[in-house]
Structures are given as structure tokens and as C-alpha cells.
Image: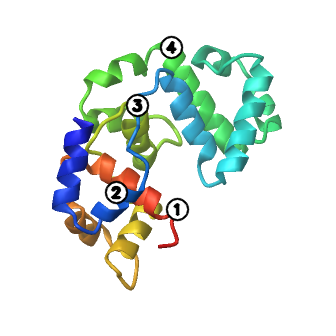
Amino acid sequence: MIERGIAQLQRSDPRLAPIIERAPRFDVRPTRNRFRAIARSIVAQQISTAAAATIWQRVEAALGEQATARAVARLAPDRLRDCGLSARKASYLLDLATRVDSGSLPLERLGRVDDEGVIEALTAVRGVGRWTAQMFLLFGLGRLDVLAVDDFGLKSAIRKLHRLEALPDRETFTRLAEPWRPYASIASWYCWRSLESAD
């Protein structure tokens, strides 16, 4: 399926084809620890990758084990703030952990739910917006046709690829990304890789 998607993208989007040729092969596999994937996304909101990794390491150190919903749900908000989380993010993380631990958010069943159903289930959690849910669809569940129209990196890549004067609005983004369907996740991954190159 992935090879078919890459081949289709090379045919359907000539601007993306050279990036696909130069970049490493797309290799995104569904994660086994779905709670951890969403929790880390919450921690990473609006901070650098390095800062998010440091805070997450502190959370796991505070737990004395790998983060599970039950273990996080037992942490006091003050303990999470000691790890570097804001009061707001601590409340988001605890809301996620409590929902998963109680079974009201059954993450193990999300693989059988369509994309919009997954987004609806996850955005019921405080602090989880559509973008975070879409990143979970792509990196957590390995869905191949996720188009995150509000992703700044993707908008920047489209601007670069199409030599636009400004970042594309949602309508322009959607139109220019139409050749990517039904493999928008693969195309997005290569767009992110294109931003790592000065070419």
C-alpha cells in the first residue's frame, strides 16, 4: 500500500516527486502505546521538541515507570507542574489519563473507527484539538490519508513548493493538495522532510 502510494504521488504531483526521490523512504508505523502518543502530543503543544522531550522524561521519572493512563491519573497536579508542565497542560494530561483509565475513552478501539470518529472522540478531551487528533491518526494509527490543513509546517512546505508569496489559506491548501489523495499522510511526511533541506 505504501509503495503504491509513493508511486502515485510521484505521478500525480511533479513538484513533490524530486523530494520523494531524495528523502528517506516513508516509514510511519502505528504505535502500540496510544495513550503515551497522545499524552506526548499534549506535552509538546507550543513548545520546542527538545523542551517537550525533557518534560516528558521528567514525567516518566516522577512515575518511576513508563507512562500509563492509570499511573498518570494518580499523579497530583502539583507533581506534574514540578515536571515543567503548566497548570493548564497538567489539567489536560490528567483529563486524558482519567478518561482512558476509566474506559470512557477506549483507545484500543479507535483503530476500528473512521477518521472523523477518532477526531470526535479525542477532541472531547480538554486540550486536544483537531490538529492533535490528526497527528494521532497519522503517527498513532498509521492512517494514510490525513490532511492537516492547519499544520504550519505543511503550509510552509506548500508555499515553498508552489513558490507562493504567502502561506496558503485553507481553500488554496486543499486545492493544491488534491493530487495527494488518498495518500495525503505520505505526501505530508515528504513535505515535512522538504523543510529540512535548503534546496
Label 4 vs label 1, nearer the camera: 1
Q: Measure how far apart labels 3 and 4 are at the Cα level.
A: 27 Å
**Residue furthest toward the right?**
82
Name the kind of residue labelled 4 in the image. Answer: Ser
Q: Measure how far apart labels 4 and 1 are at the Cα level.
A: 41 Å
If the image is split into quadrants, where does the N terminus sit?
top left
Mark 2 or 3, nearer chain start: 2
Q: Measure how far apart labels 1 and 2 are at the Cα level.
A: 15 Å
Residue 123 visible in image: no
* Horizontal and vertical percent position of residue 20: 34, 56
Label 3 vs label 4, nearer the camera: 3
User: Where does label 4 land, which residue?
Assistant: 102
Name the kind of residue labelled 3 in the image. Answer: Arg
User: Where does label 1 land, which residue?
Assistant: 196
Mark 3 is surrounded, within 10 Å at the Cα level, by few (under 14), some (14 to 19) or many (20 or more) other residues, namely few
Taking 123 as reference, is 113 above or below it?
Answer: above
Relative to residue 127, is residue 53 drawn left or right? right
* Horizontal and vertical percent position of residue 8: 17, 51
Q: SS at mark 4? A: helix
Relative to residue 3, is residue 126 drawn left or right? right
Q: SS at mark 3? A: loop
User: Where does label 3 land, which residue?
Assistant: 29
